[in-house]
Amino acid sequence: MKSVDVLVIGAGAAGLAAAVSLKENSIEDVLVVDRQNFAGGILFQCIHSGFGLHRFGEELTGPEYAQRYIDMAECQNVEMLLSSSVVDIVSKDDIKEVIILSQDSGLVKVKVKAIILAMGCRERNRGNINIPGSRPAGIFTAGLAQKLVNIEGYMPGNEFVIVGSGDIGLIMARRLTLEGAKVKAVLEIQPYPGGLDRNIVQCLDDFDIPLYTSHIVTNICGSRRVESVDVSEITDGRLTPKMKISCDTLLLSVGLIPENELSITAGVSLNAATAGPIVSSDYMTNVPGIFACGNVLHVHDLVDYVSDEASACAKAVSMYLANKLPQDKCIPVHSGNMVRYVVPSTVKPQCDAILKLRPVAPMKNVKIKVVSDRGDVLKSKKLIRAIPSEMITVQLNDVPTGCKSITVYFEI
Ligand SMILES: Cc1cc2nc3c(=O)[nH]c(=O)nc-3n(C[C@H](O)[C@H](O)[C@H](O)COP(=O)(O)OP(=O)(O)OC[C@H]3O[C@@H](n4cnc5c(N)ncnc54)[C@H](O)[C@@H]3O)c2cc1C
């Protein structure tokens, strides 16, 4: 049976950055496995620019950003097994066995010392949000439409309504318009837009595409193909029928779900708020030797942060292999007032930690506070605004010994 020190599952932004960092931290025996026949993950279908400003100080397209890491991985002689799906992880004490179904090699078993989960996420679909109506052709998730247009060269329709104003929906509104389609409306269930400000301006305002906040589709009409959708406004929790929009295609951009079926098989506990693994500040899950980073851990808005997180995770893996990870008892981190989630779920005393969090709703002129169970303020940071689409990071230095828990909250 083949054996490696570290097996990385997924060759997207997270997996590639983790593999490169492992090599930089003198871990030579690394294998990256991906079910696609190319490395780069979701980045390859994101042909718009906006990637790499933090990491490289340049505005790159998704494929350009991915290529930088593919080149680095090649330079470091990272071994990659493509067209190969990891189907099972068997973890017994310190020994882990990973089962891979490979297009070229068939069933492959690999004995590993540590695993980095970097499987990314998948899109929520119609079944996840239960839109009533008939079941005609012409309903796509936004990421699938992006792949059809940017990679396969097919237009999925002519007249679109987009549900969800997250970044993928906004980027697709612009992309489809540039390809000659008519995007009639973007509908958002929340009273505020879901995507980054720059995407609202550059993808909707610049093309006069209307955004209706507090609006949902209440009926999909059409027998063979979508013909129209009925739209209602939400006011004070009640639905008021507003309009019928004729269209031949409905695009759903209604969120991403971390790909964690494999994590569950491996005995990894998940965080209900992120749907990703519960990890400590060194990115280790509850299963010793299994680490997680990137979108499989929590959905990121910027790929640069994915790469940073993956590098930090790889550094922790190298310490784990050298038996140098602090063994202290973990201190739980709780989400307080207006905080939707915090990653990591635990920190370690006398160690540094980067807390990543998102607010429940948009707020202006707030303070983010990190306090211990003894009432000590460990960090306080003023923010002119906090919005759910932008991840907030808080650096904690030297977490004090003796505290039993930490809470992060917004002071309004
Ligand atoms: C439409 C869209 C637009 C975006 N726009 C921007 C932007 O403008 N700027 C920006 O900075 N960021 C943007 N992002 C975010 C950024 O691209 C992602 O956060 C980042 O690429 C995620 O990297 P990842 O490695 O975690 O996941 P992925 O790229 O999804 O990689 C996961 C990999 O794991 C593989 N995999 C999964 N399960 C298995 C298995 N069992 N066995 C083997 N392989 C497996 C998959 O094949 C995939 O290659 C955008 C994202 C999307 C979807």
Image (tube, helix red, strand yellow):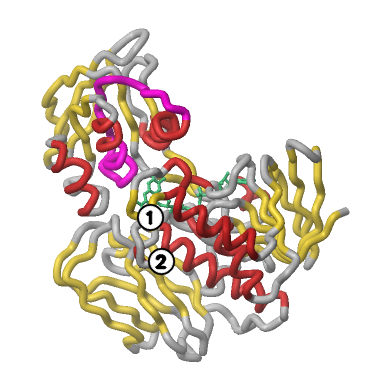
The reply to whether callout 2 and callout 1 are in contact (CB within 8 Å) is yes
Q: Residues within 10 Å of mark 2 (few under 14, many from 20)?
A: few
Residue drawn at point x = 16 percent, y = 37 percent: 207
CB at disc 2 and ligand 1 closer than 8 Å:
no
Q: Is residue 385 visible?
A: yes
Residue drawn at point x = 64 percent, y = 76 percent: 25
Residue type marked 2: Phe
Q: Nearer the viewer, residue 80 or 139?
A: 80
Q: Nearer the viewer, residue 216 or 187?
A: 187
Where is mark 1, residue-wise?
60
Residue type marked 1: Leu
Residue 56, disc: 2
Residue drawn at point x = 44 percent, y = 73 percent: 333
Q: Residues within 10 Å of mark 1 (few under 14, many from 20)?
A: some
Examine the image and state in which quarter residue 378 appears: bottom left
Mark-to-mark CA distance, 2 and 1:
9 Å
CB at disc 1 and ligand 1 closer than 8 Å:
no
Place of residue 263 in the rendered image (x, y in percent of width and height, measured from the top left)? 62, 52
Examine the image and state in which quarter residue 91 appears: bottom right
Q: Secondary structure at mark 1?
A: strand
Examine the image and state in which quarter residue 146 appears: top left
